[in-house]
Image (cartoon, rainbow, N blue to C red):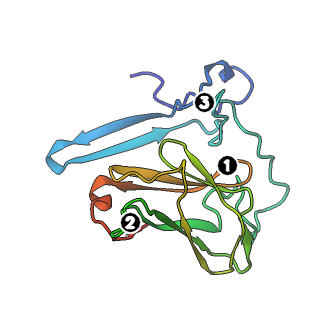
Amino acid sequence: MHDIHMNQGNPIGRFSGDNGPWQDGGLVFEFPDQKLWTAVFLKFQTQAWHTDDKTGDPIDLGAPTQPPDPTAPPTGQMPDGLVRIIAALVNALKTPEREVVTLLNTADRDIDLTGWMLADKQKNKMALSGKIAAGGTLAIVVQKPMELSNQGGIISLLDERGIKIHGVAYTKAQAKNPGLTIPF
């Protein structure tokens, strides 16, 4: 095995020519007896997590000028920010096309979601707007082109710059029960 690390997010310099989009490096293990797959993703400390989808080059989020404020809205330096995806209704009982993603604001103040987006595993995005109340939840009905697959999937929350703030995954087994909300 060779070069099993990320081949994206290298800063300008010796390895920046290796950058490419969607080149997450890792090892995938299958445990057939348990019907389980596990993956380990690797990167060097100098590589950026947030990269351009067309070039694989790092997205400059700016260096923090002071220690992070735990009450500040989510940023690239706080990728698991104050707003999180906590649940999804992937397969409604009466109307199977109705899908809902629930967000939680852990902050002590309202967070403006204007310009933020939700994205599915195919990278289809849905724009968000409005505010989520301090300490509150917000149920968002999914609109086209975004779709939540009944075969399992990924849901990502992106800020106004398109930076991933939070993400979750669910399995086909979790999605197969119509009417049940999947907690994360």
Residue at image point 46% right, 51% down:
154
Report helix, strand or loop for mark 2: loop
- Amino acid type, callout 3: Gln
Report helix, strand or loop for mark 1: loop
For label 2, the residue is: 95
Q: Quarter of the image holding residue 179?
A: bottom left
The numbered mark, 3 or 2, whose residue comes first in the sequence reads: 3
Q: Is residue 137 above or below residue 41?
A: below
Residues at marks 3 and 2, CA–CA distance in whole angstroms: 41 Å
Question: Decide: marks 3, 2 in contact (CB < 8 A)?
Answer: no
**Most foreground residue, 91 or 118:** 91
**In the drawing, does residue 26 fall left or right of residue 146?**
left
Residue at image point 26% right, 57% down:
173
**In the drawing, does residue 74 fall left or right of residue 5?**
right
Q: Quarter of the image holding residue 70?
A: bottom right
**Most foreground residue, 124 or 57:** 124
Residue 68: percent from left, percent from top: 76, 63
The quadrant in which the C terminus is found is bottom left
Q: Is residue 49 above or below residue 14?
A: below
Q: Is residue 31 above or below residue 16?
A: below
The quadrant in which the N terminus is found is top left
- Amino acid type, callout 1: Ile
Residues at marks 1 and 3, CA–CA distance in whole angstroms: 16 Å
For label 3, the residue is: 8
Residue 11: percent from left, percent from top: 71, 30
**Most foreground residue, 183 or 34:** 183
For label 1, the residue is: 163
**In the drawing, does residue 172 fall left or right of residue 126?**
left
**Most foreground residue, 31 or 184:** 184
Which residue appears farthest toward the left when viewing the image? Answer: 33
